[in-house]
Every structure is written in C-alpha cells, then in structure tokens.
Image (spheres, rainbow, N blue to C red):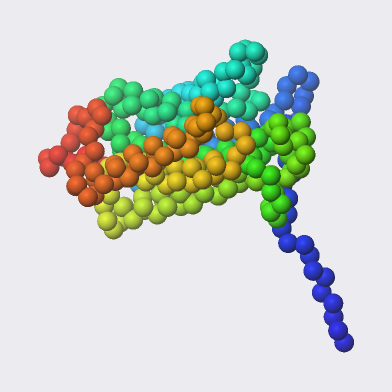
C-alpha cells in the first residue's frame, strides 16, 4: 500500500493584527506601550538579580531604572523628531504622539547614558560598573521592544518573497513601494540578533563570577556596543525608512562608531591592559585600588 504524505508549504508570513489591543471610549491600550512597560519591568528584575550576584545593593539599580526611563524615552523621541523635522514641523502636535511610533534606540541609549553618568556622580559610584549591570537588561529590552514595530507596521525592510515575509498594509507602505505587498521583517532580524547578544552577555557575566576569567569593569558594555552595532549596521541596510542625513543612513553611521569605540575600549582593557577611567571615581576602593564589586 502506498501512503501519500501531503507536502505542506514551507515558511509563513507575518501579518500584524494592528497597534491597538483594545479600546474603551477615548482610551486605548496599545501593543507598543505594553511591550515597553514589560521590557522595563523585566529589565529591573534582571538588573537587580545581577546586582545581587555581583554583591551590589539591588535597590541602587531600582533607583537607577527610574532615571533611565525618564531620560531614555524622551531621548529616543527627540532623536527621531530632530532627524524627521521636516515632517513634524508641519504637524507639531504629533511631536508628543509617541504612541504612534517613531522612537530611535540610539537616542534612548544616549539619553540613558547621560542619566547614568549623572546618577553615578550623585551616588559616587563607578559608571562602568553600573553600565555592566544594566547592559544585559538593555539589550533584552531592545529585543522585546522591536516587536512594537511589528504591531505598528513600521521599521520594515525592502520587498521580499522569502518564506518569512512581512505583509504591510497599503497605507503603511512608503512612496515607491505601493505595488509590493511583502517586505523583510527587519524587526524580527534585530530582535533575534539582540537575543543572541543578550545570551553572550549573560555567558560572560557568569563566567566572570566563576573567575574564568575575571573581566575588567566595563567589558560587558563595550561588548554590547560592538556586538549590537555589528548586527544593526547590516540590518539597517535592508530598511526603507531609515533616518537620513543627506545620503547617509544615520543608524549605520552611529553603529560604525559604536563598533569602533567598543573595540578600542576592549583593546584598552585587554591588549594595553589599562583600566577604564572612572568618570566619577567612587569614594570606596580596595587597598589595591581595584573597584569594589
């Protein structure tokens, strides 16, 4: 007897259900907001756990996260608006309409870094140690937050017929692409890449706890800069909605700078065997001058 096995088509397509979870009168719960809130809560929990393992007061990380959120979200929005000013000067009321999408992770990182520097100065602790504790939560939050682009049908790539293609509604397609239905799901590419960077950072963190080998303070943040930027620089090349400055894709330029700074920092630590200077040195140090952990 011959048994025929049906052959199922390989692959699948992504189709967003829309940005709103549910509405109640004038109020709406949006996927983007839910994802950002979830990323913050998960990030706080993870950072405090890592702080405990490192022997740092976890309440310190809880206080820091408040600063980071208050600086990162406005920073992400301001960065985006500045590079899309021609659009927003025609509709200034949309500048604060963050729920419609339009934030830039590089702006969030810049705003958060400034907040962390100020926080470190006020608390008289090492900025680089704080950065190492927060960085795994940061990249995990980026992996979660990228799915907000999926629900908003934004930040997608060029047209494609790959099995994992993303359907974009006609009203969300950019000029010149209205005849195409399916596009690269660059949100998915970056989310997966960020999860791999997250796994690498956790691997390095726990190896450091076991002393195999001990890492210099600032290593995790520098690895994050180089690794995340390496993925972003090629993923950005697929996108159709990049922030531009003349002929340049801003995110690629910033990512290239991130790769160079990350690699130079790692060379400073491990090739030239010099510690990163504390931006604002802590008051308490061990007798040998090394940062307390």
- Work out which residue is located at the far front of the displayed protein and give it: 247
Residue 156 visible to an observer of this rendering: yes
Towards the viewer: 293 or 91: 91
- Rendering quarter of residue 281: top left
Towards the viewer: 38 or 140: 140
Residue 289 picture location, percent across and down: 14, 39
Residue 55 picture location, percent across and down: 31, 43
Tell whether 287 sits left or right of 176: left
Q: Residue at x 69, y 48 (%)?
A: 160
Q: Residue at x 31, y 52 (%)?
A: 209
Tell whether 112 sits left or right of 7: left
Height in image: 20 above or below 5? above
Image quarter where the C terminus lies is: top left
- Rendering quarter of residue 102: top right
Residue 211 picture location, percent across and down: 27, 56
Residue 176 picture location, percent across and down: 71, 34
Height in image: 150 above or below 211? above
Towards the viewer: 245 or 168: 245
* Total number of numbered discs in the rendering: 0
Q: Residue at x 32, y 45 (%)?
A: 263
Residue 21 visible to an observer of this rendering: no
Tell whether 186 sits left or right of 227: right
Image quarter where the N terminus lies is: bottom right
Q: Residue at x 65, y 42 (%)?
A: 158
- Work out which residue is located at the far bottom of the displayed protein and give it: 1
Tell whether 262 sits left or right of 284: right
- Work out which residue is located at the far right of the displayed protein and give it: 1
């Amino acid at each position: 007897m011959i048994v025929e096995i049906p052959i199922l088509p390989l692959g699948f397509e992504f189709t967003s259900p829309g940005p709103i979870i549910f509405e109640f009168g004038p109020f709406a719960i949006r996927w983007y907001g839910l994802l950002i809130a979830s990323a913050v809560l998960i990030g706080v929990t993870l950072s405090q756990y890592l702080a405990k393992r490192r022997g740092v007061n976890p309440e310190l990380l809880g206080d820091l996260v408040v600063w980071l959120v208050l600086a990162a979200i406005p920073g992400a929005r301001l960065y985006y608006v500045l590079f899309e000013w021609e659009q927003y000067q025609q509709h200034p009321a949309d500048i604060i309409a963050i729920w419609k999408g339009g934030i830039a992770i590089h702006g969030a990182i810049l705003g958060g870094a400034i907040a962390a520097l100020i926080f470190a100065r006020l608390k008289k602790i090492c900025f680089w140690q704080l950065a190492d504790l927060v960085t795994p939560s940061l990249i995990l939050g980026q992996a979660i937050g990228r799915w907000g682009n999926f629900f908003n049908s934004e930040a997608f790539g060029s047209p494609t017929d790959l099995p994992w293609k993303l359907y974009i509604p006609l009203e969300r397609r950019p000029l010149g692409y209205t005849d195409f239905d399916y596009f690269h799901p660059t949100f998915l590419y970056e989310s997966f890449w960020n999860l791999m960077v997250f796994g690498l950072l956790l691997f390095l963190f726990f190896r450091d706890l076991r002393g195999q080998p001990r890492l210099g303070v600032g290593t995790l943040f520098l690895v994050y800069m180089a690794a995340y930027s390496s993925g972003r620089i090629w993923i950005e090349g697929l996108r159709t909605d990049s922030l531009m400055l003349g002929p340049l894709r801003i995110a690629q330029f910033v990512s290239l700078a991130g790769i160079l700074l990350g690699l130079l920092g790692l060379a400073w630590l491990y090739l030239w065997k010099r510690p990163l200077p504390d931006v604002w040195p802590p008051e308490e140090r061990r007798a040998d001058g090394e940062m307390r952990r």
